[in-house]
Image (cartoon, rainbow, N blue to C red):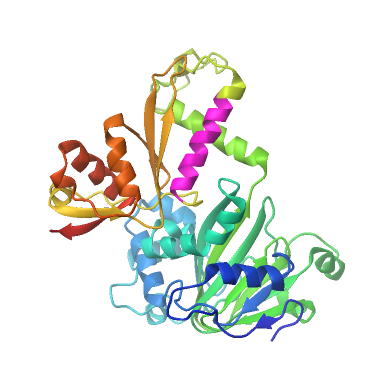
């Protein structure tokens, strides 16, 4: 059921040899007018990006995180209505190991139409993060980092039309690739901006999509299909059958946004650990002259060199996480004994990124290591080990030194290295 962008049948060449993402991106570019118009590719992947078991595990992992972090990323409705209690219900009773996603949801929501939506899902499922990082490889090769950044969102349910109504995403140049993991079908309806405004006479969202769908570009996603959606168009999803889709979101940033984000990162790093002039966390009046930044011990330097250094750091951080802005949920329980007796290997496709920082007016020369978006200061004696790890070859830290064990343990906790087990 499609008009406008159309659909394209058939899979990619080279089945059984992994996914040809370069070919996938080339076909999308050709069939969408360089990623402008919506289009569906029918079952184009040799290996699925994820399955329903992965998505159930993602929701289970969310419940192990800090509730405030998880609650900001989670959105839950029944019969189109949001209630705070629904988030707590998901957090309190996530899918158990072995639970199938749809029967779990039927029990949890008493058979009512439901939606569970999760932003930044790369934080809570390592396999999904790695699959998405591979999916975006052609975009990174074309645009580089940090011009692009990426995010994964989940949309699960039989909620009918998306509760947010017919809307557009504004603020950044963004495209979303939807992979339908099943078990049911999904529809996406979209309208070019001027057509939508001519139909409705307004710019704001519509919560009556039924009146508009006959004028839409409508695309149907069977399980295994991938769709490209230009979210600057007005659009709405429709799930009349229980289905779970993964939104692989790609934002292209302008230079000013990159500079602003880099500066924010740098200021945050500078101020961590500084003595705050408002020393007492209790809520009592304590007037502060915020123009007097003596407490912050800021570097004495010209603005342009400082910003250039901030962008270099931001780029290294972004490269280490392959464009994802959020870091993965760490593994706090990994201990040094397990690493000492085991073998570690780079968490492909994510690289370790080293950066030599020259001496400045307020800092000595030093070396920084970036792993999955986290910055560590490391001694120069560790650089050979880091270069070796970044090749992807297995390394036995216990055969090296105490420094190697400590560093490897930190990197396993940050998910920059995989612990392969005892040897």
Q: Quadrant of the C terminus?
A: bottom left
Using the image, determine if residue 176 lies above or below residue 143.
below
Residue appearing at x 27%, y 50% in the figure: 412
Using the image, determine if residue 49 lies above or below residue 301.
below
Q: Where is residue 134 in the image (x, y as percent from the top left)?
A: 47, 62
Q: Where is residue 34 in the image (x, y as percent from the top left)?
A: 71, 64
Q: Where is residue 140 in the image (x, y as percent from the top left)?
A: 56, 54
* Range covered by the magenta-colored residues: 306-321
- Asked whether residue 316 is drawn in magenta, I would say yes
Residue appearing at x 12%, y 48% in the figure: 337
Relative to residue 301, is residue 420 drawn left or right? left
Main SS, magenta residues? helix
- Asked whether residue 157 is drawn in magenta, I would say no
| Foreground residue among 83 and 166 | 166
Relative to residue 268, is residue 365 drawn left or right? left
| Foreground residue among 24 and 81 | 24
Residue 283 shows in the view: no
Using the image, determine if residue 355 lies above or below residue 215.
above
Quarter occupied by residue 292 = top right
| Foreground residue among 107 and 74 | 74
Q: In which quarter of the image is the N terminus?
A: bottom right
Residue 149 shows in the view: yes
């Amino acid at each position: 059921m499609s008009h406008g962008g159309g659909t394209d049948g058939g899979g990619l060449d080279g089945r059984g040899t992994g996914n040809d993402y370069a070919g996938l991106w080339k076909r999308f570019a050709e069939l969408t007018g360089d990623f402008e118009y919506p289009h569906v590719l029918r079952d184009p992947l040799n290996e699925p990006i994820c399955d329903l078991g992965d998505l159930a595990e993602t929701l289970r992992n969310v419940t192990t995180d800090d509730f405030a972090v998880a609650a900001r990323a989670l959105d839950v409705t029944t019969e189109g209505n949001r209630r705070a209690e629904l988030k707590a219900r998901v957090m309190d009773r996530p899918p158990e190991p072995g639970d199938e996603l749809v029967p779990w949801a039927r029990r949890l929501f008493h058979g009512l139409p439901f939606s569970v939506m999760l932003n930044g899902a790369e934080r809570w499922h390592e396999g999904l993060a790695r699959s998405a990082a591979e999916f975006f490889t052609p975009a990174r090769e074309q645009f580089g980092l940090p011009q692009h950044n990426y995010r994964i969102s989940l949309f699960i349910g039989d909620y009918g039309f998306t509760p947010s109504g017919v809307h557009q995403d504004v603020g950044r140049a963004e495209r979303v690739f939807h992979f339908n993991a099943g078990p049911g079908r999904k529809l996406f309806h979209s309208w070019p901006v001027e057509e939508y405004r001519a139909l409705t006479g307004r710019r704001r969202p519509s919560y009556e999509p039924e009146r508009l769908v006959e004028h839409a570009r409508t695309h149907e996603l069977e399980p295994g299909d991938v769709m490209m959606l230009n979210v600057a168009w007005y659009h709405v999803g429709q799930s009349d059958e229980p289905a779970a889709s993964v939104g692989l979101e790609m934002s292209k940033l302008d230079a000013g946004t990159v500079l602003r984000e880099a500066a924010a990162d740098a200021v945050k790093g500078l101020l961590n650990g500084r003595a705050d002039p408002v020393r007492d966390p209790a809520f009592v009046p304590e007037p502060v002259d915020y123009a007097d930044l003596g407490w912050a011990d800021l570097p004495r330097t010209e603005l342009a060199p400082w910003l250039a250094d901030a962008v270099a750091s931001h780029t290294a951080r972004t490269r280490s996480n392959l464009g994802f802005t959020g870091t993965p949920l760490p593994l706090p329980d990994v201990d040094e004994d397990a690493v000492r007796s085991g073998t570690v290997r780079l968490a492909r496709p994510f690289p370790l990124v080293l950066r030599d920082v020259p001496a400045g007016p307020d800092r000595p020369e030093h070396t920084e290591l970036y792993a999955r978006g986290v910055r560590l200061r490391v001694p120069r004696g560790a650089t050979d080990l880091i270069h070796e790890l970044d090749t992807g070859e297995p390394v036995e830290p216990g055969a090296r030194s105490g420094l190697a064990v400590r560093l490897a343990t930190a990197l396993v906790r940050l998910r920059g290295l995989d612990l392969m087990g005892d040897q």
